[in-house]
Image (spheres, rainbow, N blue to C red):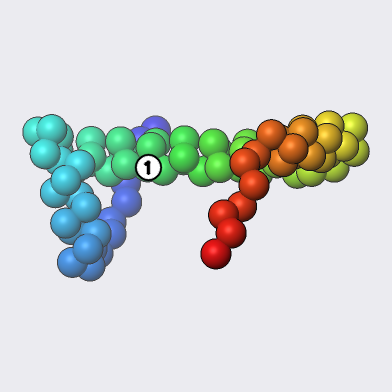
Amino acid sequence: MPRSLHVRLDDSSAAALDIVRAGSFSDSEAVRIALREAAARRRLRSTVRAEVRELAADERDREEMRVIREQLAELAPPPPVD
């Protein structure tokens, strides 16, 4: 069963709704679109955070990155002398 929701929009939320509605959507369609997009962004950020934590805990990967940084530092030109 569809769920009905009543909200009061402040000025910035009303402006955001206008942007989403620009595609000729109704208020309800625009809110559903915005909620799905916001949920997708949150899921993506959560996935990225989990991946970063996993990489940070990977000692082999951290050691490999250290070695690569050292190799790149050897290839870098010397700093300018003032």
Q: Where residue 33 sits: x, y (%)?
A: 30, 36
Displayed quadrant of residue 20: top left
Displayed quadrant of residue 49: top right
| Residue lying at the far right of the rendered structure | 59
Tag 1 residue: 35
Point out the image quarter for the C terminus: bottom right
| Residue lying at the far front of the rendered structure | 82
Does residue 58 appear to the left or right of 71 in the view shown?
right
Does residue 11 appear to the left or right of 46 in the view shown?
left
Q: Where residue 61 sits: x, y (%)?
A: 83, 33
Q: Where residue 39 sits: x, y (%)?
A: 46, 40
Q: Residues within 10 Å of mark 1 (few under 14, many from 20)?
A: few
- Choose between 58 and 47: the one closer to the eye: 58
| SS assignment at label 1 | helix
- Choose between 9 and 64: the one closer to the eye: 64
- Choose between 80 and 3: the one closer to the eye: 80
- In this rendering, the count of numbered labels is 1
Task: Please name the residue shown 21% across and 52% down the image.
Answer: 16
Does residue 46 appear to the left or right of 65 in the view shown?
left
> From this viewpoint, is residue 61 visible?
no
Point out the image quarter for the N terminus: top left
Q: Where residue 64 sits: x, y (%)?
A: 83, 32
- Choose between 49 and 11: the one closer to the eye: 49
> From this viewpoint, is residue 11 visible?
yes
| Residue lying at the far bottom of the rendered structure | 10
Task: Please name the residue shown 83% across and 35% down the image.
Answer: 67
Position of residue 63 relative to residue 13, above or below, is above
Task: Please name the residue shown 11% across and 39% down the image.
Answer: 22
Mark 1: which amino acid? Leu
